[in-house]
Amino acid sequence: MDARTSDRFADEQAALRHVATLVAAGAPPEEVFAAVTAEVERLMETDLAAMVRYDPDGAVTHVARGSSAADGRRVGLRAPLGGRNAVTMVFETGRSARLDDMSQVSGPPTEIVRRLGVRSAIGVPICVEGRLWGVMLISSTSDKPFPADTEARLSAFTELVGTAIASAQARVELRGYADEQAALRRVATLVAGGASPGEVFAAVAAEAGELLGAELTSVTRYDADGVLTILGAWASTGASFPLAAGTRTALGGRNISTMVFQTRKPARIDDYENATGAAGQLGRDWGFRALVGVPVMVEARLWGVMSVISTREEPLPADAEERLAAFTELAGIAIANAQAREELRRYADEQAALRHVATLVAGGAPPEEVFAAVAEEFGRVAAADFTSVTRYYLDDTAAIVSVWTRTGILQPPATGERMRIGGQNITTLVYQTGKPARIDDYADEASGAFSGIALDWGARAAAGVPIRVGGRLWGTVNVWSAQEGALPADTEGRLAAFTELVGTAIANAEAQAALAASRSRVVTAADEARRRIERDLHDGAQQRLVTLALQLREAQAMAPPEAAGLVRRLDEVATGLEATLEELREIARGIHPAVLAQGGLRPALTALARRCPVPVDLDVQVVGRLPDPVEIAAYYVVSEALTNTARHAAATAATVTVTAAGGVLRVCVHDDGRGGADFARGSGLVGLRDRVEALGGHVSLHCPPGNGTILDVDIPTTG
């Protein structure tokens, strides 16, 4: 071996040691590529040197270049394969290629060759683990061709370089795998901790961006209405993503979101200037230059797309799709878990809402209170800005019976005011079809009387769900959004399941209201009958008995003195007649006390207290007259209570307190007797309870044995 050959061999070994040292120190691939290219350029004493990688999509990427000449090819630049040139020839044959005459060169390198005056070029394959990975390219502007042994020397060098590259790549892949696992663990921790889907989406976007060294990332969901919604986004600079979470845009055209949706496969666009459609226009407006998108599958269903975005001229890494796909596979599981948790939470919220409504109905709440609860619970379950419950009538009119707003600052219309059904609005659509309906752009699409109310509220989108009661269309619950964009696609489905039970609740409430009204009518009719009987007794039988008693006294006075027996007999009959008249008056007072009708509650209760054999302390704090049914009910409560006290309690004293405040008449009867009274032990107390409850009141009885009896009664004085 001559000295020149020995020196060259030593230089090659030194170059390889340099590269090996970098690999052993864990240098990133980019640094290894740059070092290899620099060493080749130095060892081969060439004008130009570059390392080019073959990508899976039929393109090549310049991963490193020498420093001795500016050939205009940037690191990261991608170009298609094709034509007659060293890069394409190596790819097609898998062997070294030499071009000593560049006049016949063609394909993408042609312009560079001519501009720089390249006269000859050699390409040597770089194989990594038996696979053609790329090509080491050298070229010269000299008329003198490369030495005959150049390919051999370069091949011997690149064989060891391939091993170095494989080691560097393996290290990076291992580090990348560890990073991916750490990222997924962080996402999984969020899910396990009960984080909301929004938090999970934001974390997935951030982790993907960090892993791929991207500038921007986004997680976008495909909705059923042909629209996609951004749910999570991340920017490497810390600035906000240009498109806020919740931004919605239509599918269509040539853009990453649409390409992934149509193919269910990863997609890339290296020059977004050529993108079209609504999503493409948004990207161009914000300076997107290159994008890679990978489908996010949730439970074997295409759920959305994860995109990584570059605003630089350099394309995204060739393996971006592969790395992102591996990440999104597990991210899809995390999203599924988060969605399942959210659905469970949502189900619990719906059940809590239904329990609230059912509790009101079971407690006998009036229909208007049930309607108000339905509107509020619907609004909270659907996360709406405001909701309304509207009732339909047989004359093609409807009335809003309840309104709820999230902010509480909207002015609702007068509830119960009927308006004509018609036009294009949610209330009319549900009425005409009997099915759920939606309007996504209320300002442009709605018309009719009911649309004016919603537009005054600032409605931008609405959905309505029918309420059926007893198989008939009773009304509708409408949910409204004051934000741009449609309501979630599943709004109608969620509310329809809810309204099925709400219809039952309303039916029960109406039935209870009808029963209460019927009981009230029965009590009122009974009171009217009492008045009529009392009046008939007063005007008929009592007057007739009074007349007969007077006639008997006149006959007694006209009898001769010798008819002493007849006089005595007439006196007995007249006395008996007067006693019968007094008994009849007592009966009439029991049927409907005249003193109550004439003077009101205070004198009527005073009369009851005086007639009671047990001393009564009476305190009536009522000013003026109350409605007849209320006064009558209070009178009979006190009458029955004092009667029971006198007959059964063995009491020595009783107290009666009557007060009126806040629209309620409160009656309390308390004695010091033996106690033990029970609704189940007599018809008198049961009758009182029925009378009071028919008026919407409440009766409570507290009577521990040996400690007296307390009867408390509340009767509404209005409504």
Image (cartoon, rainbow, N blue to C red):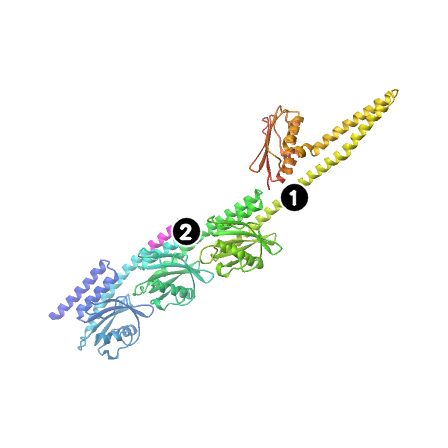
| Front in this rendered view, residue 378 or 172 | 378
Classify mark 1: residues with Cα within 10 Å, few (<14), some (14-19) or many (20+).
Answer: few
State the residue at coordinates (13%, 68%): 6
Q: Which image quarter holds the N terminus?
A: bottom left
Pick whichever, 579 or 265, lies toward us.
Answer: 579
Residue underneath mark 2: 196
* Percent x, y of residue 677: 62, 30
Q: Is residue 132 above or below residue 439?
A: below
Mark 1 touches mark 2? (CB < 8 Å): no
Please, what secondary structure does the residue beneath circle 1 have? helix
- Magenta stretch containing residue 18, yes or no? no
Relative to the observer, which residue lies in front, 85 or 493? 493
The outermost residue toward the right is 562
1 or 2: tag closer to the N-terminus: 2
Q: Which residues are the magenta region?
A: 181-196
**Residue under circle 1?**
518
* Quadrant of the image occupied by residue 642: top right
Q: Can residue 711 be seen?
A: no
**Quadrant showing the C terminus:** top right
Per the model, the C-alpha gap separating discs 1 and 2 is 50 Å
Left or right relative to 261: residue 166:
left
